[in-house]
Amino acid sequence: MSSRRSSRITDEEISELISKLQSLLPESRRRSMSRASAAKLLKETCSYIKSLHREVDDLSDRLSDLMSSMDSGSPQADIIRSILRS
């Protein structure tokens, strides 16, 4: 039972985690949320993560299109492959 109590997160720790999470959001999203509730912050964070996923998918599609349209032995293709390996 005592180990159960020691693993609980305090209100202070929650506040600190919320502040850290808010600092990870882009400035434009943080500005609209000054002194926002934890629920609003979590909702905004989820929206931001979803938008990042969409952006990654879009960039991946664009890269696939680019790679399929160029000669695989071209210098440009070599540069792209070396970037992707890094």
Image (tube, rainbow, N blue to C red):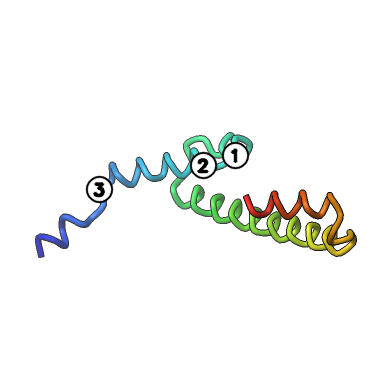
The image quadrant that residue 68 belongs to is bottom right
Q: Quadrant of the N terminus?
A: bottom left
Residue occupying image coordinates x 16% and y 62%: 4
Label 1 neighbourhood size at 10 Å, few (<14), some (14-19), many (20+)? few
Q: CA distance from mark 2 to mark 3?
A: 21 Å
Q: Residue at x 54, y 51 (%)?
A: 45
Could you say which is closer to the camera, residue 13 or residue 38? 13
- Extreme-left residue of the structure: 2
Report the mark closest to the observer, 2 or 3. 2
Q: Secondary structure at mark 3?
A: loop
- Which residue is under mark 3? 10
* Residue position for label 2: 24
The vertical placement of 57 against 29, above or below, is below
Left or right of residue 21: residue 33:
right
Q: Position of residue 6 (x, y in %)?
A: 16, 55
In the rendered structure, the answer to whether residue 78 lies left or right of residue 14 reads right
Q: Find out whether the residues at labels 2 and 3 contact each other: C-beta distance under 8 Å.
A: no
Q: CA distance from mark 2 to mark 1?
A: 7 Å
Are circles 1 and 3 on residues that touch, CB within 8 Å?
no
- As drawn, the label of residue 26 is 1
Find residue 32 and report its horizontal and vertical position in percent: 59, 37
Helix, strand or loop under label 1: loop
Residue at 78%, 62% in the rendered image: 61
Front residue of 17/69: it is: 69
